[in-house]
Amino acid sequence: MRTGLAVLALATIASACGEGGGGDKVEPAGGQQPYQAPPARALDSYATKLRAAHAASVAAAKRWGLKKVPLTAPEPPEKKPEITTRDGFEVDGHRRLGLPPVFTTVPTKEKILFLTIDDGEEKDPAFLRMMSELKIPYSAFLSDYLVKEDYGYFKKMRDGGVGLHNHTLHHPYLPALSRARQTREICGMQKVIEKHYGERPALFRPPYGNYDKNTLRAAKSCGITHVPLWNEEVFVDRWEYREWDRSLHPGDIVLTHFRGRDDWKGTMPDMIRRFLDRVTAEGYAVARLEDYL
Ligand SMILES: [Zn+2]
């Protein structure tokens, strides 16, 4: 649902962009017009700003080779949805032990998706520019053995408002490890992120999506509240799906990776282009996962 302000904003964008120009420029009334009220000027400058913002979006979409301007996500919900563990994804005693929920979709009726990017191998400056110019939100799930090559790259990401989250120190297959070693992998990464980026993450994603009861107990013990997995994965040349219907659904979490030409037949911007062109064509906007959890 949109707020009144958002509706006004959209209406203003539509009229600002629909006109050939000039029509919105109100001639100042005569010298002593008593109703030259500030709100009218304020609205005019608001419309001017919106028009400038829209022009910037069109230019950015063009510059990055998108077929269409990405849709803007609705305002975040006032009341966050209740997140529960997906059927079949529970561990023994999940609810009784109060373990963090494991889920692949966020309950919402809005046509929105959440983009999550894992590991941290590729550190492409063009990707940072692309995402900030297009204003596409995403969340990063980082593994220290890759991130430590250049902590500064992810600091720029954080400074741009991206949530940095936990994907373990060394990316092991966690269910093969003892509870103590799992705790070192997960809680150790909490400390690394806090040390370099100033905040302990609330979100954790186990490598390969594999976890057991000890994983969730370890995660909970060092402050993790949610374990988002994914419902689709996007690569530079294809999509993969968890569901048989091979479609996007409202609230789906989409996974991709920080990868480039070493692993893929293309760059991160190429992958984002594939992602956004499809998402926009199907009427979805990309929203910020942290706003819903
Ligand atoms: Zn991973």
Image (spheres, helix red, strand yellow):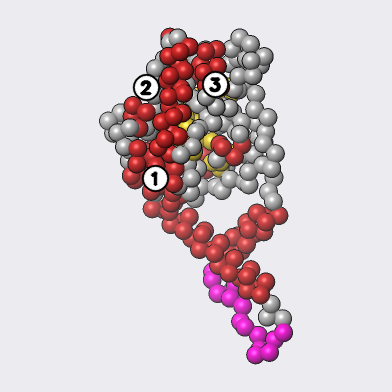
Crowding around mark 3 (Cα neighbors within 10 Å: few <14, some 14 to 19, many 20+) is some
Q: Mark 2 points at which residue?
A: 170
Magenta span dominant secondary structure: loop
For marks 3 and 1 on the same chain, the one whose residue lies earlier in the sequence: 1
Magenta span: 17-34
The picture places residue 172, in percent across and down from the top left corner, at: 39, 17
Q: Disc 3 or disc 1, which is closer to the eye?
A: 3
Give residue 221's mark.
3
Where, quadrant-wise, is the N terminus in this rendering? top right
Query: Which residue is drawn at the image coordinates 68% and 48% (left, top)?
Result: 2
Is residue 158 something that shows in the picture? yes
The picture places residue 240, in percent across and down from the top left corner, at: 46, 25
Viewed as shown, does residue 203 lie left or right of 261? Answer: right
For marks 2 and 3 on the same chain, the one whose residue lies earlier in the sequence: 2
Is residue 230 something that shows in the picture? no
Crowding around mark 1 (Cα neighbors within 10 Å: few <14, some 14 to 19, many 20+) is few
Q: In which quarter of the image is residue 19?
A: bottom right
Calculate the distance from the C-alpha at mark 1 to the C-alpha at mark 2.
Answer: 22 Å
Query: Which residue is drawn at the image coordinates 67% and 36% (left, top)?
Result: 80
Viewed as shown, does residue 100 lie left or right of 39? Answer: left
Amino acid type at image mark 2: His
Amino acid type at image mark 3: Ser
* Element assignment for label 1: helix
Q: Mark 1 points at which residue?
A: 156
Frontmost residue, 98 versus 49: 98
Where, quadrant-wise, is the C terminus in this rendering? top right
Viewed as shown, does residue 180 lie left or right of 100? Answer: left
The picture places residue 67, in percent across and down from the top left corner, at: 45, 47
